[in-house]
Image (cartoon, rainbow, N blue to C red):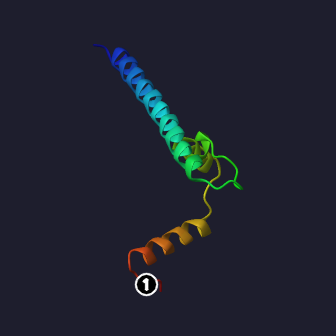
Amino acid sequence: MTPAEVRAVVEAKVGQRDQEWKFQDVLNGVRCSLLANINRSQDTQPFTAADFSILKQAEDEMKEPQSPEESMKIMDQWVIATGGIIV
């Protein structure tokens, strides 16, 4: 197999995997929204599958770069959650 053929096979496999992940994400979103809508009160808005989509949330978060201040807040929260002390 030539390197170009190997690359084509790898790209096809990665594309197939990504499609499977997207399908599973949508399916899990439908399941979660169904459970949430069963248990929601009458005065709240219905949930959609997109409300529980992990991949969409990750894409939205990647659009905006994180500032150094936001990074420090996350690190401080992690230190507190693991029982450390912020100096």
Q: Is residue 44 or residue 82 the one in the foreground?
A: 44
Residue at 64% x, 56% y is 41
Residue at 56% x, 52% y is 39
In this rendering, is residue 5 above or below 84?
A: above
In this rendering, is residue 29 above or below 82?
A: above
Q: Callout 1, which amino acid?
A: Ile
76 horizontally vs 70: left or right: left
Q: Is residue 83 or residue 44 the one in the foreground?
A: 44
Q: Position of residue 64 (x, y in %)?
A: 65, 51
Q: Position of residue 49 (x, y in %)?
A: 58, 40
Q: Label 1's element?
A: loop
In this rendering, is residue 20 above or below 38?
A: above
In this rendering, is residue 20 above or below 68?
A: above
Viewer can see residue 53: no
Q: Quadrant of residue 68?
A: bottom right
Residue at 55% x, 66% y is 71
75 horizontally vs 61: left or right: left
Q: Dot 1 corresponds to which residue?
A: 85
Q: Is residue 52 or residue 12 the one in the foreground?
A: 52
State the quadrant of the N terminus: top left
Q: Position of residue 74 (x, y in %)?
A: 52, 68
